Image (cartoon, grey):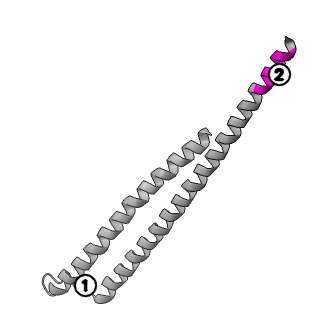
Amino acid sequence: MRNTNKLITDIREQTDNLDMLLTYASSLSSAISVDHSECLNADGEGGFTYSDDIADGLLALNDYLIEQIKQAHRQRNKQIYELIKAHEAQTEVLSAYKLAECERKAVEVAKDE
C-alpha cells in the first residue's frame, strides 16, 4: 500500500507540473500572437523581420505542444483514478485478511479453553 500511495503522490506532482507547462504554453501562444503583430509593424526598424510563415509555424508548434500536454494530463488523471481503485482494492483485501486473522485467533482461544 505504501508504494501505491507514493505512486499516487508522484502522479499528482507530475499533473501539477503538466498544469504549469500548460499555463506556460498558453502564455507563449498569446505572446507569439502579440510579438507577431508587433514585429510585422516594426519591419525595417533595426533590420528585424518576422515572416508570417515563421509566426504561423511557431503558433502551430505551440498548439501541438498544448494538445500533447493536455493529452498527458488526461492520461495522468486516468492513472491516478486506476491507482486509487487499486489502493481501495488493497485496503479491502487487507481488511478482510485482518478480520479472518482475528476470527482464526478467536477460534484458537476458544479451543484452548
Task: Determine if residue 7 is in view.
Answer: yes
From the viewer's perspective, is the residue at label 1 or at label 2 nearer?
2
Look at label 1 and name its amino acid.
Tyr
Span of residues in magenta: 103-111
Task: Determine if residue 48 is in view.
Answer: no
Q: Crowding at label 2, few (<14), some or many (≥20) Cα neighbours within 10 Å?
A: few
Q: Quadrant of residue 53?
A: bottom left
Look at label 2 and name its amino acid.
Val
Looking at the picture, tell me which residue is in the foreground, 88 or 18: 88
Residue beneath disc 1: 50
The reply to whether the magenta stretch includes residue 108 is yes
Farthest-out residue, left: 45
- In the image, taking residue 107 as reference, residue 5 lies left or right, namely left
Residue 45 image position (x, y, % from top left): 12, 84
- The numbered mark, 1 or 2, whose residue comes first in the sequence reads 1
- In the image, taking residue 1 as reference, residue 30 lies left or right, namely left
Q: Crowding at label 1, few (<14), some or many (≥20) Cα neighbours within 10 Å?
A: some
Above or below — where is 86 with respect to 29?
A: above
In percent of the image, x 56 and y 55: which residue is there? 81
In percent of the image, x 78 and y 21: which residue is there? 106
Considering the numbered disc 2 on the image, is that residue within a helix, a strand or a loop?
A: helix
Above or below — where is 112 with respect to 85?
A: above
Considering the numbered disc 1 on the image, is that residue within a helix, a strand or a loop?
A: loop
